[in-house]
Image (tube, rainbow, N blue to C red):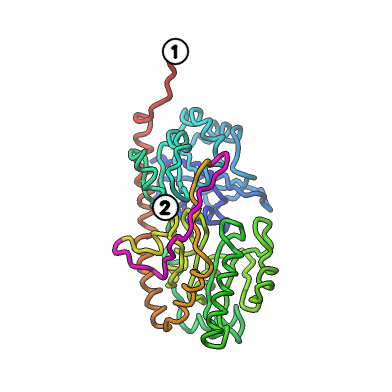
Amino acid sequence: MKKKKVLILSDHALSTSGVGTQTRHLVEGLLEKGGYEFRQFGAALKHTDYRTIVVNDNFIIKPIDGFGDRDLIRVTLATEKPDILFIFTDPRFFIWLFEMEDEIHQVCPIVWWHVWDNKPYPKYNETLYQSTDIVNCHSYLTYEMINEHFPEKTNFIPHAVPENVFFPLSKSDIEKYKVQVLGFDKRDHFVGIWVNRNAKRKRPNDVLHAWKLFLDKIEEKYGKRNATLIMHTDPLDQEGPNLAVSSEMLGIHKNIFFSRDRVEFDKMNILYNISDVCFNISYAEGFGLPTLESMQAGKPIIALKTGGLTRQVVDHRDNSENGIALDIECQTLVGSQQVPYIYEDYVSAQTTADAFFKLYEMSQDERDALGEKARSYALSEFKFQDTVDRWHGVLEDLHSDWKKNYKRWEMFSY
């Protein structure tokens, strides 16, 4: 049987970005199904090595700067003759591709793993949706918005992580690693973890402010500041503030641990396991992969009810919480020339600090029970095999039906 060749445009699948790791997991899952071969243009701002990577005979990655251009796609369509073009990232990077969709459709259909951070429905994206054969949404909020307008091509297929990547460690291992990472003097500390890029949208300085308010609160009540925040980020990223200076200004630098290096999954699993809670208060968050990863490691989360975070922190089946869900306290309508309108959602530093304090005051048994609830929910509602199976079904159907179903643009003279 001839294998279906899928051409992927997304973050480099061997990178540590959320888009990159999700691309890798999905490709690995689909390869186990058989019947596929993948060619990827692996995007990044800059690579240290531009040599083609042969992961295996059915998965080959060519590193490129950015996400490509028209000439690259034209040559690839002619030489590789893919059966499907798969795109996965912010559509603003692909405007040039949507503008040449008529050329692409001479060869193959276009599928898109899509997310949109917030309401209102982005009517200004309709041409993009019309140019795409399948729009698979990885947040339920995105699915609700797009499905209302394009029900014939829209599916909900969430992000997911294989069960053997993030999982609970034994208590003895957690104690050992906690001392190794944070030091012996912090072996009994309450630990929060924040895993994001140091960039404005993620509110890193507000995270530090909230942690200060939390430390002040436990010192006032208990006379100690026995809590450490792990920030897995680059504190010197040019897209954000100098977090080392900010933490010193706030007087909390001794209670902050910067995890600066890009690490593999096993090291991230250790960081999640030695933490008591993972949290995210970004004002715009399409999905929020680290909170899901930490849930699979058996940890409760604190998250703002925005974008893809809502369906993680709130169990949609009974509205119970997998940690603490933060209500939106302020919403602003912002925009740009490319994105004329979209809401940003905010919660205050004080409310975030109060959530930390609530978890801090729980017993270890109570936190463990909440973490087990979060893990059970993640493995049920974000089951990796379900995501792979749904993608497999969509690709199979699209490959067999798209030529007879695709409606080409028609021009009329009057």
Mark 1 or mark 2: whose residue is earlier in sequence: 2
Where the C terminus falls, by quadrant?
Answer: top left
The Cα–Cα distance between marks 1 and 2, rounded to whole angstroms, is 42 Å
Tell me the number on the disc at residue 413.
1
Residue 253 percent across, percent down from the top left? 66, 75
Q: Residue at x 46, y 48 (%)?
A: 115
Judging by the rendered image, the residue that carries numbered circle 2 is 139
Q: Residue at x 47, y 45 (%)?
A: 37
Residue 128 percent across, percent down from the top left? 47, 36
Mark 2 nearby-residue class (10 Å; few <14, some 14–19, many ≥20): many
Instruction: Report which quarter residue 318 is drawn in.
Output: bottom left
Which structural element holds mark 1? loop
The disc labelled 2 sits on which kind of residue? Answer: Ser
Give the side of residue 155 with respect to residue 172, left or right. left
Instruction: Report which quarter residue 314 is drawn in.
Output: bottom left
Instruction: Please name whichever residue, 115 or 355, is drawn nearer the observer in this view of the structure.
Output: 355
Residues under numbered marks 1 and 2 in contact, where contact means CB atoms less than 8 Å apart:
no
- Residue 239 position (above or below residue 6): below
Tell me the number on the disc at residue 379.
none
Q: Which residues are magenta?
A: 317-339
Mark 1 nearby-residue class (10 Å; few <14, some 14–19, many ≥20): few
Name the outermost residue toward the top.
Answer: 414
Query: Would you say residue 334 sits in the magenta stretch?
Result: yes
Which structural element holds mark 2? loop
Q: Residue at x 55, y 65 (%)?
A: 195
Query: Would you say residue 76 sits in the magenta stretch?
Result: no
The disc labelled 1 sits on which kind of residue? Answer: Ser
Inspect this view and state whether residue 339 appears. Answer: yes
